[in-house]
């Protein structure tokens, strides 16, 4: 199967099913640094990224935001001094979709690119 980072988000209107636990278990190994967290009954992918200061945390935040706009699929972002918490889930279906795994993998790619050019 194509690597998650190579995939594009598909337009995700409501009505498509949420991923079930087996499907989630199949996908999580491809985003090993992410946790599946249930918040108010909604499963989401969550990862905490650490940075040396606020400026780099904000730069990462904006890069993730740009990718989200490009894909039409958006995260929850908590940006603090030295850290950014990124959460992905699909609001339209109240749970996880393949898109969320694609975007988690793309988020890791952005972090890796930033670390490489430090
Ligand atoms: C109209 C707009 O495309 C939709 O609201 C999109 C925007 N970005 C989105 N992002 C996420 N994470 N889930 C959604 O259901 C979603 N829907």
Image (cartoon, rainbow, N blue to C red):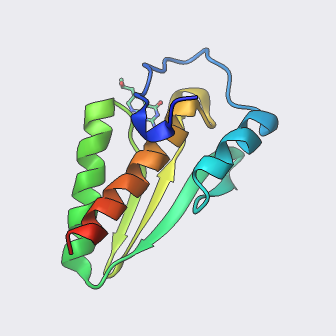
The structure residue drawn at horizontal position 32% and vertical position 40%, both measured from the top left corner, is 68
The structure residue drawn at horizontal position 23% and vertical position 45%, both measured from the top left corner, is 66
Is residue 43 rendered to the left or right of residue 54? right
Is residue 35 rendered to the left or right of residue 26? left
Is residue 72 rendered to the left or right of residue 94? left
**Residue most extreme to the right:** 22
Q: Quarter for ligand 1?
A: top left
Quadrant for the N terminus, please.
top right
Could you tell me residue 98's position as x and y percent?
Answer: 57, 32
Q: Quadrant of residue 52?
A: bottom left
The structure residue drawn at horizontal position 53% and vertical position 27%, both measured from the top left corner, is 92
Could you tell me residue 76's position as x and y percent?
Answer: 43, 52
Is 92 placed above or below 36 here? above
The structure residue drawn at horizontal position 81% and vertical position 36%, both measured from the top left corner, is 22
Quadrant for the C terminus, please.
bottom left
**Residue most extreme to the front:** 1
Could you tell me residue 105's position as x and y percent?
Answer: 47, 48
Is 33 placed above or below 105 here? below
Compare residues 117 and 95 and report the one nearer the observer: 117
Could you tell me residue 20's position as x and y percent?
Answer: 76, 33
Compare residues 17 and 40 and report the one nearer the observer: 17
Compare residues 95 and 104 and report the one nearer the observer: 104
């Amino acid at each position: 199967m194509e690597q998650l980072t190579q995939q594009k988000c598909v337009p995700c209107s409501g009505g498509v099913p949420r991923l079930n636990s087996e499907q989630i278990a199949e996908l999580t190994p491809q985003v090993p640094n992410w946790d599946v967290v249930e918040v108010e009954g909604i499963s989401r992918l969550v990862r905490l990224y650490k940075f040396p200061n606020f400026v780099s945390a904000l730069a990462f935040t904006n890069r993730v935001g740009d990718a989200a706009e490009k894909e039409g699929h958006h995260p929850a972002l908590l940006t603090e001094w030295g850290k950014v918490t990124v959460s992905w889930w699909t609001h339209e279906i109240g749970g996880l979709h393949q898109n969320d795994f694609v975007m988690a993998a793309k988020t890791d790619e952005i972090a890796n690119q930033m670390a490489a050019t430090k």
